[in-house]
């Protein structure tokens, strides 16, 4: 009871104010992301409303903002183009179902395989893609648009020096809209991009044939959406955890994202997830509790439905300015400086994540590349820890090989090559008690060595195999046995 | 964690801390137990504080915000730590002057109830102010922490409100329940109240086993060397207790506390809470 009350009502004033600031920033983003996905602005706006409101109740990280996002919008582009909105709504519902399952089977633990470099690559790629998505609005247009965009950026970054009481993106939008109306500029506005919400959202079931064909179309998209959504949500949750020095419930967040997406699919919204930028804005504005997220969603809907005629008039240039701010704010600028100082393998992982994502427009593929690459690099590094020493004994009749370190698929060859099979000798002792055999490749490498020596007519004795192969047992629980430290730290 | 059986005085930086310290010193001296003064520095990450509603995402906004927030926390905690140290030192001097031999002091981060639960194994008696930093003495309200804290604890808790006065007459509110039977046993065995006249009071004549339970309780107290005066009276428990306290100038109340589930006290209110709001004398709560 204590925590429920605490999560909702311990910060009411700040949560309400922060929620409003966030709502004002959410509107241009939701519109922009709808345009990226190729749907009417109302699809993104309804989605942002519904996701924010639902996640406020069911999410695992109070104070985090979830809504329609660029990462998700990028994934659904081809689905919308080839099959239309109804399939997107169905895919959104299916994404939610998959996310709930992921939460139940505690898929969140897999996040620990996503290294810091991959996370940095993810946010950088996201920033680049958001920026690139603005370019169509900036090509083949009159100079007015450039002037408006530049002025917008100027207001966004400079207005806070005058006052921090009013959100500067809001000022940008109001000023640019007023200028466009007064000067009667003939430039593109939000109204040109498609329908805006004219009523409260209503419940509707996606209009698709319920058959295997449909599933075959939407399942690949839903899987990618699930992965991307959970990735960004869990990353954002970690960021908010750090910012506020508190803990979040990651599995509850997975399930919560699922519930939010299901609800959103049924009211005609596109799939979404947590937003890094907006969540940071929320915390920066003093939002900490669930109320801030709820308020952001409700306020957004009220604004859009009742001020729809005004929202229609917003020039796209204003939106582009806000989105450029978002992409600049999302990009991790420190990572460029770090390219010099960080280990080259980390930088490679980061860059690979960025390159693959930007090339495929698919954050899931980028992250997968990054994770695999960090796996390779890690295996390579750990593989360095393998020493084979040997000593002749018993007046040249016997040689003892002393193996120290990690033997696994990446070092098995090096392990085999360390033995001198051509040596003329009676007995060979292989002492592996200070080595770890991690997998079947390692064991068969040892078999091979023993066999080769036998062929040369040597007697072979392997010492300490029990200790060495303790790591082979496929139980993650070596560490929780009493002698775990001895086992893992050289017996 | 700690084998010693100490008296733990939970203080915050309010005027009531002096009373808590004094009663704790009294209890420690009587029980010949070490005294520890505990100040818990609570952090409130669930509360945001900012005037920045600019909503603009500057480059590296996240890193900046992180360093800003941690710097704030750092300043905050340092200040609280230093203030708390000075204030604890003063209380310690006071307790030493009151004749307690061993007085330890400690500051911890965390929430009060969590901290006390962690600390419980080494503690014989908790002393706690019924009002805290946020309260005004004459407002008949319980400090926000009291119920929360008392509920998580298993050991007796001495709750105090006003200036220290060495207790001279003790009232045990006895209802025949296992809880108060155990409480009587505890009083009989402990040196805390030894030598003080005890008034054993049961309210509600209807209970059949009442007289018998009363006799047993009084018996065990007498055997331990207490002078006991017992009676069973009819009427509303709270009123009778308040009357007895007033008419017989009782200055320490011993009672069972919060024996019902949390939800019940949220819905119907808690008898313990009501009574604690009305009495001004220290109350030793048994769990």
Image: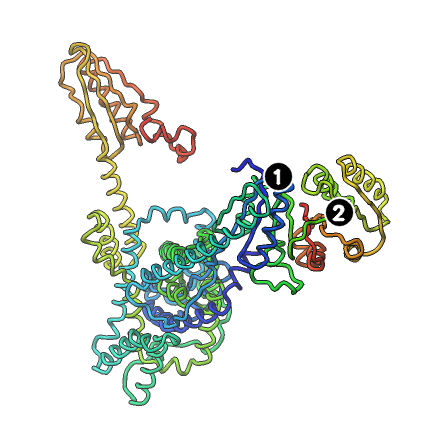
Residue A40 visible within the image: no
Q: Which residue is label 1 attached to?
A: B32
Task: Assess disc 1: are there few (<14), some (14-19) or many (≥20) residues with their C-alpha within 10 Å of its C-alpha.
Answer: some
* Chain-order first, disc 2 or disc 1: 1
Marks 2 & 1, CB-CB < 8 Å contact: no
Judging depth in this view, the residue of A424 and B64 nearest the camera is: B64
Please report the residue visible at 26 percent of the width from the left and 39 percent of the height from the top.
A379
Judging depth in this view, the residue of A425 and A445 nearest the camera is: A425
Task: Assess disc 2: are there few (<14), some (14-19) or many (≥20) residues with their C-alpha within 10 Å of its C-alpha.
Answer: many
Chain for disc number 1: B
Query: Any mark on residue A320, and which?
Result: none
Q: Quadrant of the N terminus of chain A?
A: bottom right
Percent x, y for residue A113? 33, 46
Count up the numbered dots: 2
Badges 2 and 1, same chain: yes
Chain for disc number 2: B
Judging depth in this view, the residue of A427 and B270 nearest the camera is: B270
Between tags 2 and 1, which lies in front?
A: 1
Please report the residue visible at 34 percent of the width from the left and 80 percent of the height from the top.
A314
Please report the residue visible at 34 percent of the width from the left and 67 percent of the height from the top.
A37
Left or right of residue B88, residue B274 in this image: right
Q: In which quarter of the image is the C terminus of chain A?
A: top left
Determine whether B124 is above or below A36 in the image.
above
Query: Any mark on residue B172, and which?
Result: 2
**Helix, strand or loop at mark 1:** loop
Percent x, y for residue A87? 40, 63
Left or right of residue A353, residue B157 in this image: right
**Helix, strand or loop at mark 2:** strand
Residue B146 visible within the image: yes
């Amino acid at each position: 009871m204590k925590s429920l009350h605490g999560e909702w009502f311990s910060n009411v004033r700040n949560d309400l104010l922060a929620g409003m600031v966030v709502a004002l920033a959410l509107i241009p983003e939701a519109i922009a992301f709808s345009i990226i996905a190729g749907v009417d602005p109302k699809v993104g706006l309804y989605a942002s409303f519904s996701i924010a409101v639902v996640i406020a109740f069911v999410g695992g990280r109070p104070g985090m903002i979830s809504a329609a996002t660029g990462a998700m919008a990028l994934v659904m582009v081809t689905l919308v183009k080839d099959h239309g909105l109804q399939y997107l709504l169905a895919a959104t519902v299916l994404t939610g179902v998959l996310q709930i399952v992921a939460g139940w089977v505690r898929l969140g633990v897999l996040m620990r395989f996503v290294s810091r470099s991959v996370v940095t690559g993810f946010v950088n790629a996201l920033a680049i893609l958001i920026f690139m998505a603005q370019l169509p609005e900036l090509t083949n247009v009159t100079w007015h648009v450039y002037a408006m965009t530049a002025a917008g950026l100027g207001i966004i970054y400079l207005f806070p020096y005058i006052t921090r009481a009013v959100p500067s993106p809001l000022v940008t939008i109001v000023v640019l809209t007023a200028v466009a109306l007064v000067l009667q500029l003939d430039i593109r506005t939000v109204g040109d991009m498609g329908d805006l919400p004219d009523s409260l959202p209503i419940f509707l079931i996606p209009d698709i044939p319920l058959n295997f064909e449909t599933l075959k179309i939407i399942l690949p998209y839903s899987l990618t959406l699930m992965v991307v959504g959970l990735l960004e949500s869990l990353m954002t949750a970690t960021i908010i955890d750090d910012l506020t020095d508190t803990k979040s419930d990651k599995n509850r967040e997975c399930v919560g994202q699922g519930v939010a997406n299901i609800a959103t699919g049924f009211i005609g919204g596109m799939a979404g997830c947590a937003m890094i930028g907006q969540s940071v804005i929320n915390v920066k504005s003093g939002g900490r509790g669930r109320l801030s997220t709820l308020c952001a969603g409700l306020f957004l809907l009220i604004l859009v439905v009742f001020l729809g005629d005004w929202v229609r008039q917003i020039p796209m240039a204003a939106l582009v300015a806000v989105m450029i701010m978002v992409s600049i704010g999302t990009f991790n600028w420190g990572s460029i400086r770090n390219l010099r100082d960080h280990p080259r393998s980390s930088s490679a992982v980061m860059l690979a994540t960025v390159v693959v994502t930007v090339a495929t427009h698919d954050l899931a593929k980028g992250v997968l590349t990054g994770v695999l690459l960090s796996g390779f690099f890690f295996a390579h590094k750990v593989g360095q820890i393998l020493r084979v020493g040997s000593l002749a004994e018993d007046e040249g009749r016997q040689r003892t090989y002393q193996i120290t370190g990690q033997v696994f698929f990446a070092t098995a060859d090096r392990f085999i090559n360390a033995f001198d099979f051509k040596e003329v000798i009676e007995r060979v002792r292989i002492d592996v008690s200070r080595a770890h055999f991690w997998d079947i490749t390692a064991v068969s490498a040892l078999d091979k060595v023993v066999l080769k020596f036998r062929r040369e007519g040597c007697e072979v004795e392997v010492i300490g195999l029990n200790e060495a192969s303790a790591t082979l047992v496929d139980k993650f629980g070596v560490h929780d046995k009493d002698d775990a430290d001895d086992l893992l730290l050289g017996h | 964690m700690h084998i010693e059986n100490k008296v733990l005085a939970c203080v915050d930086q309010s005027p009531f801390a002096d009373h808590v310290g004094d009663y704790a010193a009294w209890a420690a001296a009587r029980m010949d137990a070490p005294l520890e003064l505990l100040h818990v520095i609570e952090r409130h990450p669930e509360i945001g504080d900012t005037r920045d509603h600019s909503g603009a995402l500057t480059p590296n906004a996240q890193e900046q915000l992180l360093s800003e927030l941690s710097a704030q926390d750092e300043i905050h905690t340092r200040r609280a730590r230093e203030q708390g140290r000075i204030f604890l030192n003063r209380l310690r001097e006071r307790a030493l002057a009151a004749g307690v031999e061993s007085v330890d002091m400690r500051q911890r981060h965390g929430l009060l109830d969590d901290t006390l639960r962690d600390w419980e194994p080494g503690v014989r008696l908790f002393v706690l102010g019924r009002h805290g930093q946020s309260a005004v003495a004459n407002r008949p309200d319980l400090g926000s922490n009291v119920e929360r804290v008392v509920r998580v604890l298993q050991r007796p808790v001495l709750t105090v409100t006003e200036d220290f006065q060495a207790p001279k007459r003790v009232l045990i509110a006895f209802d025949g329940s296992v809880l108060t039977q155990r409480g009587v046993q505890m009083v009989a065995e402990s040196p805390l109240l030894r030598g003080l006249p005890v008034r054993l009071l049961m309210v509600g004549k209807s209970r059949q086993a009442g007289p018998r339970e009363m006799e047993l309780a009084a018996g065990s107290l007498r055997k331990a060397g207490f002078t006991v005066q017992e009676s069973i009276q009819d009427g509303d428990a709270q009123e009778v207790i308040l009357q007895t306290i007033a008419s017989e100038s009782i200055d320490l109340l011993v009672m069972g506390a919060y024996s019902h589930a949390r939800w019940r006290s949220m819905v119907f209110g808690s008898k313990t809470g009501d009574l604690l709001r009305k009495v001004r004398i220290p109350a030793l709560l048994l769990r």
